[in-house]
Structures are given as C-alpha cells and as structure tokens.
Image: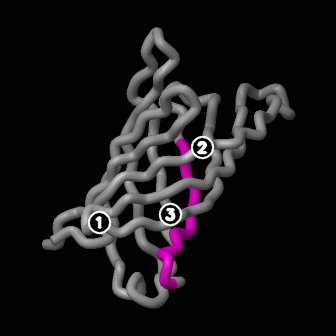
C-alpha cells in the first residue's frame, strides 16, 4: 500500500517576479503556495511552501520545500525539485520532478524516502500526481 507516499496535490502559486539584477541573463522567481493533498489512502492534508524557479534555463528548473499537516496535527516536511518539459499553445505548462521526506511528526513520523511526480499548471492551478519510489 502506498499510504502517504502517493496522491495528488492541488494549489495556487503566488509569484514574486525578479528582474535580472546583474544583467547576466539570470532570472530567479520566488513562488509561495498553499493547497490540499489527497493521499491515495483516502486521507487529506493542507500544505504550504515556497520554491524558486530559474527562468534563465530553458527547462525552468525549480526547487523548494513544503510542510503538510493532517487534521490530527501530524506533519511532514518535504523538499522537491523538478523541471519544465512542455508548454502548450493554451498556456498550460507541465513537467516532472522528485520529492524527498525530511522529517515528520505523529502518523507522518515514519514517512521516509521519496519519489517522483508529474505536474501541470493550468489556469493558475498547480496539480501534481506523486508516487513513492520503490524500495530496493
């Protein structure tokens, strides 16, 4: 069973766009977000986090961290990274990434390891399906 290692995240991003301060072609934007997680075991959590996106790269690489909170107060802190793999004419973008559990409390204290994710942003809504990497 995938328990808390698989599910779907939904959130809205709030962006702070940056200029290229040094004139060297590097532009890094900051995103703050909050939303919900529907785990494959039927439980839900709220989450909040931050990320940076390197807009000077064609794959718009990003990385960040978030904390998920279950209704009983159990929490999990995770990091993630990824990249853009497509942008369509309708304004929809998407890509792939990875996540890694850092620490947890309560029922999420045992969440370890990490896995992959596939994500899309459409009409301002982030949707990421995530799955735990198989243990060796």
Magenta-drawn stretch contains 34 = no
Mark 1 Cα shell of 10 Å, populated few (<14), some (14-19), many (≥20): few
Q: Secondary structure at mark 1?
A: loop
**Which mark identifies residue 12?**
2
Query: For the magenta stretch, what is the residue range?
Result: 62-72
The residue under label 1 is 42
Return the residue found at the far top.
Answer: 89
The residue nearer to you, when weighing 29 against 93, is 93
Mark 3 Cα shell of 10 Å, populated few (<14), some (14-19), many (≥20): some
CB atoms of marks 2 and 3 within 8 Å: no
Q: Residue at x 62, y 59 (%)?
A: 49
Above or below, 97 against 24 in this view is below
Give how far apart the Cα atoms at labels 2 and 3 are.
18 Å
Q: Residue at x 77, y 40 (%)?
A: 16
The residue nearer to you, when weighing 49 against 99, is 49
Magenta-drawn stretch contains 65 = yes
- Across and down, in percent, residue 55 comes to 63, 31
Give how far apart the Cα atoms at labels 1 and 2 are.
22 Å
- Across and down, in percent, residue 88 comes to 43, 15
The residue under label 3 is 79
- Across and down, in percent, residue 30 comes to 71, 45
Compare marks 1 and 2 and give the one earlier in the sequence: 2
Return the residue found at the far right.
Answer: 21
């Amino acid at each position: 069973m995938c328990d808390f290692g698989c599910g779907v995240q939904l959130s809205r991003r709030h962006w702070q766009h940056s200029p290229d301060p040094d004139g060297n072609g590097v532009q890094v934007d900051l995103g703050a977000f909050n939303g919900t997680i529907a785990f494959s075991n039927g439980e839900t959590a709220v989450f909040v986090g931050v990320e940076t996106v390197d807009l000077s790269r064609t794959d718009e690489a990003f990385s960040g961290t978030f904390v998920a909170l279950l209704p009983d107060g159990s929490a999990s802190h995770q990091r993630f990274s990824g990249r853009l793999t497509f942008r369509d004419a309708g304004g929809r973008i998407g890509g792939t990434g990875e996540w890694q559990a850092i620490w947890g409390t309560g029922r999420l204290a045992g969440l370890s390891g990490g896995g992959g994710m596939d994500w899309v942003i459409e009409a301002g809504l982030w949707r990421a399906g995530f799955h735990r990497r198989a243990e060796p």
